[in-house]
Amino acid sequence: MAGLAATYGSGSMTNAISCIEKADVILITGSNTTENHPVISAYVKRAVTRRGARLIVVDPRRTKISEFAQIHLRQNLGTDVAWINGMMHVIIQEGLYDKPYVESRTVGFEELKRMVAKFTPDFVESITGIPGDQLAAAARLYASGKPASILYCMGITQHTTGTDNVKALAALAMLCGNVGVVGGGVNPLRGQNNVQGACDMGGLPDVYSGYQKVADPALRAKMAKAWGVAALPEKPGLKVTEMIPKAESGEIKALYVVGENPLVSDPDLNHAEHCFQHLEFLVVQDIFLTETARNAHVVLPSACFAEKEGTFTNTERRVQRVRKAVAPPGDARDDLSIICDLSTRLGYPMRYEGAEAVFAEMASVTPSYAGLSYARIEKEGIPWPCPVPDHPGTPVLHMGSFSHGKGIFFAIDYIPPAETVDDDYPLYLTTGRVLYHYHTGTMTMKSEGLMDRAPECFVEIHPSDAKNLGVAEGTRVTVTSRRGSIEAVARVSPRVRPGMIFIPFHYAQAAANRLTNARLDPISGIPEFKVCAVKLAKAA
Amino acid sequence: MGEDGQNVIIINGNPYAFEPGETILEVARRHDIDIPTLCHLKGAPPTGACRVCVVEVEGAASLMASCATPAGSGMAVHTETPKVVAARRQVLDLMLASGNHNCTIRQPDEADWTAQQLKVMQEDQAEELCPVWGDCRLQELAFRYQVTAKRYDPAKTLYPQELANPFIVRDFSRCIRCGRCIQACNEVQVNNAINFGFRGAALKIVAAGDRPLRNSDCVFCGECVQACPVGALVEKDTRYRVRPWETTRTRTTCSYCGVGCQLDLHVADGRVVRVTGAEDVAPNYGSLCVKGRFGYDFIHSPERLTTPLVRDGNHLREATWDEALDRVATGFKAIRERDGADAIGVLCSARITNEENYLLNKLARAALGTNNIDHCARL
């Protein structure tokens, strides 16, 4: 998100999901779309099979969606900036870019041009392993798309260079005049139901709701007045990936964790567990006794989505209703009333008639949500920004101009991943999800049917590596990184490239995150889940 | 409406404007004129397979399938003439006779009726009527057109039911071969898992060389189940357990990925018993994935937390809300006094609502006095 915000002035999907229906060319990278966003993948598959849209997939794994692609480029892990710069090199070299758009709507083109000059197809091949002619063909195909849409996911962001990757994609889209255009755009597919909403609502250390900066004295004063306090803290807070290590150093003494399971989802889990042990006071509010809740001092039982009123904001910024269908079990309560009760006990009373009253207060202090109300989204959700009550919502951002005026080209050089393979750890590991499970599995693993389809963790390994290591389909293997070790069964498959393995991160019993690297992107604070070095052997 | 009659069609004597390329059915639906359909699936190309939507077009030699016939300027269409009704009755009659349609509307002579019911019960391994009784397009139309299948012998069952997966029961004896499931799979979800196999009377919907779904390309999105107009494709969990008139529906947003599919939770006796996609709204227009449609067991899991817990030494014990919340408030206040508010961190959540996240942001900054709030968007 930081990458898009820097380039365009706003960090979210630029276009509506339905824009996929209008795209001439679609570029998907770092997204196993059919397994992680199945309903969006259907939009893409329909565009290709029924309308003749052309699809480019750039992904090291042979994913299902790549079977629909006209061109599938399989890059080495952690080399995204190189292939994106390579595509821009070809597009500039061959004069395929949108000159009027670049001149009227962007700044920084000359710097970009100088940077990508060295990223010739041959040079890019030496880094990414993508054959130069294929890269050039993909570049020409993307440039020919009128319009062309880019879809990406965690395969782009979960790198130490994640922000760079996104800025490079954002530049590629602007270069071809695809931003602020129906059917185009740069579209991060959000992995969790309300990750967009959690960001929008000020669930970030440096902003209030609607991305209003904590550091801005005027906004601080506005929020203090709205909330009836004399002053609000000035210093931007810590990111989650900073809070947990600071538990070890003692700067963080207490954590209040609501609906999250960091003790499966965090990178370098062994270290994260160690950090949690140092907490003086841990409060967990969840629907299950998760791995994290087991370590808590107080556990507060909450309601799931079917048991409460409210709204979620989806990946295309569409604000949609959540409605209560059943009562929470036992004494469990919805999070809203727990938070109000706790706040009141902390000496800051919160009393609301219900979720709608909270929404109304939020909208009154949040410009991008100001025109929204439960009445307006009763039948169908509306995408923000929606500044006034008669505004129709904004399916496509940046039409006419960018949020901060002109779009900025960032000239980005290629930096290798934080950890590369060597003699001791000769294989690359990447992680991800499978269709039948969701994040840390606290919900999906309660379903017999889903467990029947995807019962246990596995290690996807290329047949050539499997042969060298004496591993066959179903062999139990041990995978070890510098940080930890797990055991799982091998699945021998050409879906991965030689020299790399894939492990889904859902399974607490064989948590892939015992292996992953906690090195962070310096700007977004996102860990490099998608690349680390490991070794693999038959289990003892 | 053009004054020269351009792009105007006459339906049942009334003129209606149409967009070039629109079918007769689409124009009629847009103007609330009811033409029944079975195989027609919105959003997929028409197949004209079932012939239930036939209409009379003046000057045409035969009845036309309204789903597949483009509207034409000056075309005069009649949707419910005796000829149309007779054709629909014949189609429905054949369908009703073709399988285990043991709804009460089917009434051949009494001895046959009993024999048929006993046969179906044995094949269903159940003493219940058809699992979609009361929720079946064929039953509705058979009732509307008073069709009984009296003229035909009951059909033999050619293929056994497929029960070998956790989500979907395939009952070929109730399949009317309308092809809606194939359209749903190949045109809407584009999973290309099923198609027509075999020929003539042996026609069957097959997955990957006539294998069970679990050994095919099927990803259990259930689009086919939602599209099936009869009892040939039924959710395994719901079958026989829930009848539609025993449930209420609540429209809400799926809680899995960020697509935010709109869905209906079907509730009976305070429990969610079935999930279907909302067909009339963005972003999913009825589509769901396996998690959204079938992954709702967690809601009523016995492992759900039902009471607050507090730590006593090495173990967690049950507590009242008062005790638990007081302990939280006291704990936070003590740490804030000793180490300052920035020694406390709040992790809000990509799983909870906007309203709850907004309040957590308010609690962290206004009540606790720290900007240490974040969530796992990055993880």
Image (cartoon, rainbow, N blue to C red):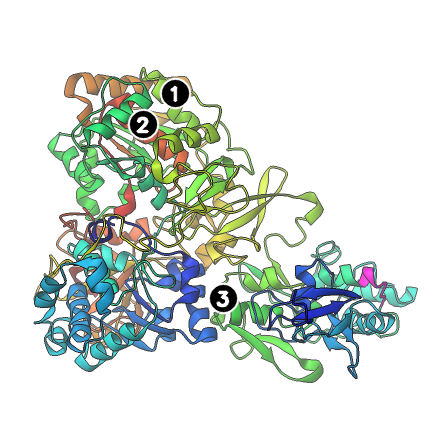
Question: From what the image shows, is residue A506 above or below residue A365?
Answer: below
- Can you tell which mark lies on residue A256? none
What amino acid does circle 2 point to?
Lys
Q: Which residue is mark 2?
A: B362
- Horizontally, residue B7 falls left or right of residue A282, namely right
Q: Which residue is mark 3?
A: B189
- Horizontally, residue B172 falls left or right of residue A539, namely right
Question: From what the image shows, is residue A456 above or below residue A460?
Answer: above
Read off the magenta span. B142-148
Which chain is disc 1 placed on?
A
Q: Nearer the viewer, residue B195 or B374?
A: B374
Q: Are marks 2 and 1 on the same chain?
A: no
Q: Nearer the viewer, residue B179 or A405?
A: A405
Q: Secondary structure at mark 2?
A: helix
Which chain is disc 2 placed on?
B
- Can you tell which mark lies on residue A350? 1
Q: Quadrant of residue A65?
A: bottom left
Q: Are marks 2 and 1 in contact (CB under 8 Å)?
A: yes
Q: Nearer the viewer, residue B343 or B374?
A: B374
What amino acid does circle 1 point to?
Met
